[in-house]
Amino acid sequence: MNRPPCSSTARPHRQRGRLGLGALLALLVLAGGLALAGWLMSQPPRVERRPASAPAPPLVEAVTVAPQAVAPSLHGFGRVVAEREARLASRVAGRLEAFAPGVLPGRLVEVGSPIAHLDDADLGLALREAEAALDQAEAALAMERGEQQRARAEYQSFGRELPAERRALVLREPQLRSAQAEVERARAARDRARLDLERATLVAPWRGMVQARLLGEGSEVGSGTELIHLVDVARFWVQVALPGDALAWLAPATETTPGSPVTLTSRGWPAGRERRGELLSVLPALEENGLQAQLLVAVEDPLALAEENRSAPALRLGDVVRLDFQAGERDDLIALPAAALRPGDEVWVLDEAERLRRRPVSVLHRDDHRVLVAEGLVAGERVITSPLGQPREGMPLRTTSSSDERPAGAAQPQSAEAHR
C-alpha cells in the first residue's frame, strides 16, 4: 500500500522564510526611525514669536468739578462750665440758725429769696444802742441850736461889729458844727447796725441752683465765712478748641449781632435730641496741648427749666458735648472728596486725551471727608479720586462710565478694581 509523502519536512521551510521577512521589515522600520530621529535632532528648534499685547490703562474714578456755595464742616468737643457761680458768705458774725426751707442741693432759689438765717439777737441790741445814740446826738444838736440863738441875740444887742473869726466864736458856730457832726456819726452807726441786722438773713443775688451747703446748721460763722455754693441757671458756657484756620469761617457775638449758631449733641441724650447755642467769643490764649484756638459757646436756659424747653435735654456742669458750628458759606470754592487731595497739596486731573496731569491747588479747608479748594482748578475739569500705585505724568487712564456724571463732593462708590 503506497502512502503519500510526509508534509512535516515542508512546514519548517515555510516558517524559516516568514521569520526572515519579518526580521527584515523590523530592521527597516528601526533604521528609518533612527534616521528620522537623527534628522529631527539635527534641526534647530523653531519658536513662533507673537507681538506682545499692550496692557490696558488703569481704571480710575473721577469727579467733575464746579464752583459752588459751600461751607466747611466744623465740629469739636467741649466741656460745660458755669457762666456765673458764687460761694455766698456771711457778712456778719453769728451762729447759723437754719437754712431757709427748700434750700437743698439741686433745688432752685429765686432772686431775693432768703437762703440762710443767722442769730440776730446781738445785732438787734446793737441797732437799739445806735438808735439811742442818734437820739442823744439829735437832742444835743437841738440844745446847741438854742444856745446859738441866744448868742446871736446877745451879739446883736452889743451893737458893735467884731472880726469874722471872733464873731464865729461868739455865735458858737464851731459848737454847732460839732453837734451836727455827732448827729451824722450817730446816724451812720444806726444805719450800719440796721444793715448788719438785715445781713443776718442771707438772700440769693440771682436765680440759681444750690450746688452745695458748705456748713451745717448751728455752726459759728464769722464775717466772710462761706455758707452755700450757688450756680446761675440762666446760661451756661461750653469751652471748645478748634484749629486756628476755623476762625475765618465763624463770627463771635457782638453787642448788636448774635454769634454763629452752634448745635450741641451728646451720647448721653436720647437719639435725635439736641440743643442750640451761639458762639460768644474767642479766648485770647491758645490751648496748651494742641495750640488750638479756644472758643466760648453760650447756651441759654441750659437746664431746660423754661416751659418752651421742657422737652429738651439738660446740660450739666462737667458734661462733654459735641458742637457742630454753622460756618459762613463762600460761593467760589470747589469741594472735593478728601481722597482726591495728594501729598503736597496737589490733585490728579484727567485731560481730554484721558491722561494724568498733576495740578497744585490752594486748599482753604480740609477734614476727614472733604477738601475746599480756592485756586488751581477750572470748572468742568475731572479730578481723579482713585489711588494709583505708580502715577506718572501723562500716563493713560480710563474711567468708569458713571464717574464723569458724579459731581465733586458726592459720595464716592467703590472702584471697579476694588471688586476684582
Image: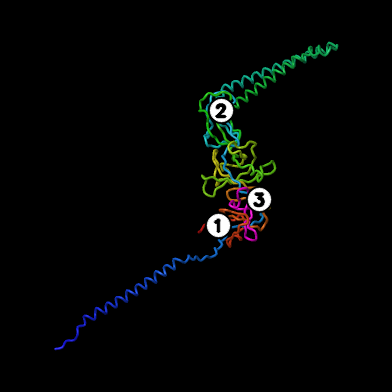
At 44% from the left and 66% from the top, the residue drawn is 41
Question: Does residue 343 show up magenta in the picture?
Answer: yes
* Residue at mark 1 to residue at mark 3: CA–CA distance: 24 Å
x, y percentage for residue 332?
68, 52
Sequence-first disc among 2 and 3: 2
Residue type, mark 2 in image: Glu
- Name the side, left or right, on which 178 lies relative to 391: right
> In this orientation, which residue lies closer to the viewer: 318 or 161?
318
Element class at badge 1: loop
- Using the rendered image of the protein, determine whether residue 42 is visible from the camera's viewpoint: yes
Label 1–label 3 contact, CB within 8 A: no
The residue tagged 2 is 226
Q: Amino acid at mark 3?
A: Val
Sequence order check, earlier mark of 1 and 3: 3
* Residue projecting furthest to the left: 1
Mark 1 and mark 2: Cα distance apart in space: 63 Å
Q: Quarter of the image holding residue 304?
A: top right
Q: Position of residue 177 (x, y in %)?
A: 74, 17
Q: Which residues are magenta?
A: 335-362
Of 355 and 177, nearer the camera is 355
Q: Which mark is residue 413?
A: 1
Q: Residue furthest right?
A: 160
Say if 105 sits above or below 376 in the image. above
Which of discs 1 and 3 lies nearer the camera? The answer is 3
Distance from Cα at disc 2 to Cα at disc 3: 61 Å
Q: Secondary structure at mark 3?
A: loop
Q: Residues within 10 Å of mark 3 (few under 14, many from 20)?
A: some
- Identity of the amino acid at label 1? Pro
Please name which of the two marks, 2 or 3, marks the residue nearer to the observer.
3
List the residue tagged with mark 3: 361
